[in-house]
């Protein structure tokens, strides 16, 4: 059967599909496909291997309702109209679990980076400002014993909470719809209201899906309830925080700093003022970007594709 892939694949992954008799067609240009290009390129496809931010919306699904499976090489699926795909009987796969540690590690890296102004100090060297030693200049804050707050404690949040608990003995509070029993038992995590999360966190890290409920929830009102010494981290989706409100909160000292692996829109413009702020660290959405994790994500995507093409239930399926 024919599979369209929105990126060039490593040979081992390609082989795991072609060895089973499938034909691959890969998009090799170094840019995302437009909506019409995606429709055009899947005209003879039985399956879509989707890497990157392709919009699998009503328009696409109406044009390609006969795809046997759409396998996303990501855990997030906010780019997909899952309700419409389900109505049309198109199974959607994703890659949960295998990227949790790598993404949590990115949040951990940002947290330490902001606390010690590492990106800023690196830029200062490049600017030729490594000179006179001033013992009170550019000081950071210590993380030992500080309270970690997690917004959306699932697999990724759990990994971050565990790292922070063991590295810095940080007590963990979280805000979720339900209880996370494992985090409560293993890490002594405490479930709190959203207001308490804002008011009590020294580091507040976002690990929720983007949805109608979470879009823009970290706005001016939310930042104004946080501690002036707090660090805000987002490695989930950029649209969960309001960028203008975040910038204002940083400029007015409502919070201490911010670390972002996700922005809205992406890519962030290179002249965005946040990039020059000393208490801000920004990465270009590299949460899962390790060799090991990306290969595992692709392997799970292959598992989903093979199941879908064989008419079987996807092992990692987002349709309800
Ligand atoms: C994911 O897997 O959702 C990552 O954020 C990459 O998009």
Image (tube, helix red, strand yellow):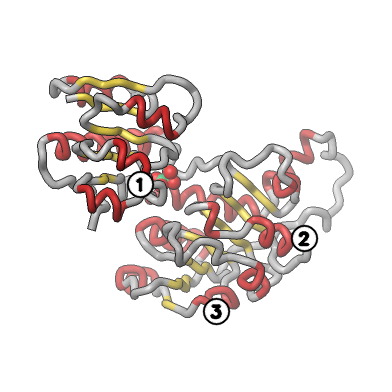
**What residue sits right under mark 1 in the picture?**
58
Q: Earlier in the sequence, mark 1 or mark 3?
A: 1
Q: Quarter for ligand 1? A: top left
Q: How many marks?
A: 3
**What residue sits right under mark 3 in the picture?**
195
Please give left or right for residue 24 compared with residue 54 in the image: left
**Residue 260 x, y percent position in the rendering:** 58, 51
Near mark 1 (Cα within 10 A), the count class, few <14, some 14-19 or many ≥20, is some
Is residue 181 depicted above or below 45 in this figure? Answer: below
Is residue 85 depicted above or below 203 in this figure? Answer: above
Q: Residue at x 64, y 73 (%)?
A: 221
**Is label 1 in a helix, a strand or a loop?**
helix
Marks 2 and 3 sit apart, C-alpha to C-alpha, by 22 Å
Near mark 3 (Cα within 10 A), the count class, few <14, some 14-19 or many ≥20, is few
| CB within 8 Å, label 2 to label 1 | no
Q: Nearer the viewer, residue 113 or 212?
A: 212
Residue at the farthest right position: 132
The image quadrant of residue 65 is: top left
Q: Residue at x 83, y 58 (%)?
A: 136
Please give left or right for residue 53 compared with residue 9 in the image: right
**What residue sits right under mark 2 in the picture?**
251
Marks 2 and 1 sit apart, C-alpha to C-alpha, by 40 Å
Q: Earlier in the sequence, mark 2 or mark 1?
A: 1
Near mark 2 (Cα within 10 A), the count class, few <14, some 14-19 or many ≥20, is some
**Residue 51 x, y percent position in the rendering:** 38, 35
**Is label 3 in a helix, a strand or a loop?**
helix
**Residue 165 x, y percent position in the rendering:** 46, 64
Marks 1 and 3 sit apart, C-alpha to C-alpha, by 36 Å
The image quadrant of residue 239 is: bottom right
Please give left or right for residue 204 compared with residue 157 in the image: right
| CB within 8 Å, label 1 to label 3 | no
């Amino acid at each position: 059967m024919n599979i369209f892939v929105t990126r060039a694949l490593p040979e081992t992954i390609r082989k795991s599909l072609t060895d089973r008799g499938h034909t691959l067609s890969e998009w090799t240009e170094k840019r995302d496909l437009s909506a019409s290009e995606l429709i055009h390129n899947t005209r003879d496809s039985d399956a879509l291997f989707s890497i990157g931010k392709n919009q699998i919306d009503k328009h696409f699904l109406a044009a390609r309702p006969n795809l046997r499976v759409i396998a996303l090489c990501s855990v997030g699926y906010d780019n997909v109209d899952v309700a419409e795909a389900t109505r049309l009987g198109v199974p959607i796969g994703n890659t949960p679990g295998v990227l949790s540690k790598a993404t949590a590690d990115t949040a951990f890296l940002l947290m330490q980076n902001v606390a010690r102004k590492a990106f800023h100090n690196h830029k200062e060297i490049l600017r030729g400002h490594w000179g006179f030693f001033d013992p009170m200049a550019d000081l950071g804050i210590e993380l030992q014993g500080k309270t970690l707050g997690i917004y959306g404690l699932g697999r990724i949040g759990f990994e971050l909470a565990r790292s922070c608990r063991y590295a810095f003995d940080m007590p963990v509070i979280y805000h979720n719809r339900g209880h996370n029993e494992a985090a409560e038992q293993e890490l002594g995590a405490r479930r709190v209201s959203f207001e308490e999360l804002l008011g009590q966190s020294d580091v507040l890290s976002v690990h929720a899906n983007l949805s109608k409920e979470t879009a823009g929830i970290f706005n001016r009102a939310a930042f104004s309830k946080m501690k002036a010494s707090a660090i805000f981290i987002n490695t989930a989706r950029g649209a969960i925080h309001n960028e203008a409100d975040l910038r204002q909160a940083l400029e007015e000292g409502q919070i201490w700093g911010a670390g972002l692996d996700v922005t809205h829109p992406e890519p962030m413009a290179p002249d965005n003022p946040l990039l020059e702020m000393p208490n801000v660290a920004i990465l270009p959405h590299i949460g899962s970007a390790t060799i090991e994790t990306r290969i595992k994500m692709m392997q799970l995507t292959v598992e989903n594709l093979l199941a879908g093409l064989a008419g079987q239930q996807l092992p990692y399926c987002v349709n309800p």
